[in-house]
Amino acid sequence: MTLSEEALTRLADIVALQPTKNGELQQRWELDSGSEVHQYLESELKDYYYRNEDSLICATPEAGELVRAEGLVESTGEDDAVEVPPIQADVIAVIAGPDEQTQSVVSVLHALEDAGHDYAVEDVRSALHSLVDKGIVERVRKTVPTFRLAVAREDLTVAELE
């Protein structure tokens, strides 16, 4: 997806302000309503943002890389930090890396069990899909969906939400 100059600038705002609210972006972008912000996000930046568990707007790791590569924001070493619930942090710790063979939901569940965690399969599936939405995990479609990290584990800073 190729972004316009305006979209890149606005994406840089999200990276710099994250986590942020519609109202903050509305003011910064001089729009008339939070609804306009939402419409812009969905039409122009859908692949580059997500809403965290508190419904705040956050940039995906890919968005951070993109605006840093364009020189629109400086790297502070924390730009790739992502706050996730404990189950998602545990999944990140055990799931296959970007260059490894993908894993099914059940395989991730077993890896979590081997690491001493006890989660229901539905919770693991939900965590994987949330991490896909955040751009941290990629879904590879086979007979059953399989997953692996979309970014190198060492390039990711994970903070568990309380």
Image: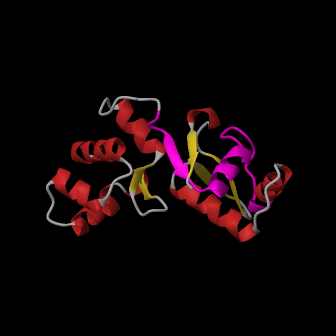
Q: Is residue 77 left or right of residue 9?
A: right
Decide which of 54, 144 is in the foreground and name it. 54
Where in the figure is residue 144, as x and y percent of width and height? 73, 64
Q: Is 82 covered by the magenta stretch?
A: yes
State the extent of the magenta-drawn residues as a range.
Answer: 78-106
Q: Is residue 152 left or right of residue 124?
A: left
Q: Is residue 10 left or right of residue 149?
A: left
In what quadrant of the picture does the C terminus appear?
Answer: bottom right
Extreme-right residue of the structure: 114
What residue lies at 35% left-to-right and 37% top-to-bottom? 67
Extreme-front residue of the structure: 162
Q: Is residue 99 above or below residue 116?
A: above
Colour theme: secondary structure
Where in the figure is residue 76, as x and y percent of width and height? 41, 29
Where in the figure is residue 9, as x and y percent of width and height? 25, 42
What residue lies at 40% left-to-right and 29% top-to-bottom? 75
* Quadrant of res 69: top left
Decide which of 136, 157 is in the foreground and name it. 157
Q: Is 18 covered by the magenta stretch?
A: no
Where in the figure is residue 107, as x and y percent of width and height? 80, 56
Q: Is residue 114 above or below residue 41?
A: above
Q: Is residue 52 left or right of residue 35?
A: right
Number of numbered tags placed on the structure image: 0
What residue lies at 63% left-to-right and 61% top-to-bottom? 127
